[in-house]
Image (cartoon, helix red, strand yellow):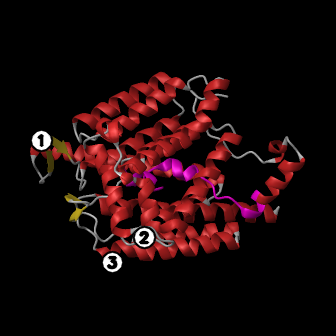
Amino acid sequence: MKTTIENIYKIRVSHIIIIAGFIILLINKYANLLDFDFLDPLSKSSITLLGIIAVSSVVLFQKKSFFLILVFLFAFNTWLLTRDTTLIVFLLFAATTQSTKKKLLNTFLTVQSIILASCIITYFLALKIKFINVSLYNTGDRTRYTFFFLQPNNFGIQFAFTIICFIYISKLSSSISIAILAISSAFLYIFPNCVTGCVVLVIYALLILFFNKPDFFKKKILRFTPYLVAIIGILIFSLYLTGKTGFIGKIISGTFSYRFIGSVMAIRLYGVNLTGHYLDKLGETLFIDGQWGTFWLDFAYVRVLVEFGIIGALIFTVILIHSIRSMIRNKDYSSLILITIVLFYGLSEWGAFSALTAFPLLLTTTPSPIKASMRCIKAEKNTNSWKIIPATIQQKTSFLTD
């Protein structure tokens, strides 16, 4: 009895430490996104380090995996090199337990909702009674509301994933979910004019409609959808890299095409190595391939490869593929849809690959090399090997029943 109480106490303490670290990282994320200089760079780095130490101290102790420690050390070194926490944060939260993941989702929704609601309400009040100065972002003939963010698209991606998280956790009916997504999409288009955010919410609504009552055929389609999105994105980038865009270039010409053009610029500037690069040229106007252009790298697939190197890209890819296969094995179709949304958003926004923004990445899991090897051995001996694999905790929305 005493041992049981001690174990429960340890689990609760570990949850508290991880959640505290998660909240610290979320708040620090907004310190970088909002148009307020209330923290200097050293303070931001110190807060980030505190959050990473809090989460890693529990995760690494729970897993007790030498392989995970090695990967963590590489990710930590990558953070020091690139000044980007995306890889190390993704790794740490992918390694958390299933019971912790549920608490992380609730925490994400709570913190995001409080901060975004505060920004929206205060911004509209400031426009009405002008008690503080507010900024507007002008693009051509459009005036875009920033809601105190440095860039309207930054607000858009935070807002979109918060709405999706609310729908995922609340287990709403398909009709109510689609109504919320329609209103949210209209809001994103009218005020911050975040087209990508609108498109993602619309696609999520279409996926809900299509997979409302998934039959055998629809389930088969959903199993391949995440891979298909990634493959299409990589193929389009390959066309831009070789300069043979053809009719594809005409179809996606405009703002979206600059995502792929920026990726080509990144390859020309930095190349690809094992450990990655610090992207010191971001935001600069450069002369590459016979033309001038501002260098931005928003296409997440290429940015992972260039910034974190081949090793970092492999870590990211292995965890994603392992998680997708696990979701398929456990028939967790709602999570598969969310991962598909992340992969689609990654075509145009780097923030889509941050676990602090794209909450579906909190649902991913890290593979164990030993368990993976044992599974392969058992699969050879038993064609029904899936029966011996423990089922993980599944969260399904009401519109995705098996």
Spatial CA span between label 3 and label 1 = 36 Å
The reply to whether discs 3 and 2 touch (Cβ–Cβ < 8 Å) is no
Return the residue at label 3. Answer: 42
**Residue 120 in which image quadrant:** top left
Quadrant of the rendered structure where residue 372 is?
Answer: bottom right
Question: Which image quarter holds the N terminus?
Answer: bottom right
Percent position of residue 81, x then y: 42, 76
First-in-chain label (3 vs 2): 3
- Which mark is first along the chain, 1 or 3? 3
Residue 382 image position (x, y, % from top left): 88, 45
Residues at badges 1 and 2 in contact (C-beta under 8 Å)?
no
Residue occupying the point 38% across, 63% down = 267
Which residue type does callout 3 highlight? Leu
Could you say whether the residue bearing mark 2 is in a helix, strand or loop? helix
Q: Residue shown at 54%/32% (left/top)?
A: 171
Density class for disc 3 (Cα within 10 Å; few <14, some 14-19, many ≥20) is few
x then y, percent, for residue 60: 64, 70
Q: What are the residue bounds of the magenta stretch?
A: 349-372
- Label disc, if present, on residue 214 of the rendered structure: none
| Mark carried by residue 128 | 1
Is residue 365 within the magenta segment? Answer: yes
Q: Is residue 247 left or right of residue 59?
A: left
Element on which disc 1 rests: helix
Q: Residue at x 45, y 50 (%)?
A: 358
Q: Is residue 106 magenta?
A: no
Q: In the structure shown, which secondary structural element does the residue marked by tag 3 occupy?
A: helix
Residue 20, visible in the rendered structure: no
Three-letter code, disc 2? Thr
> Considering only vertical position in the picture, is 393 above or below 175?
below
Q: Amino acid at mark 1?
A: Lys
Residue behind mark 2 = 48
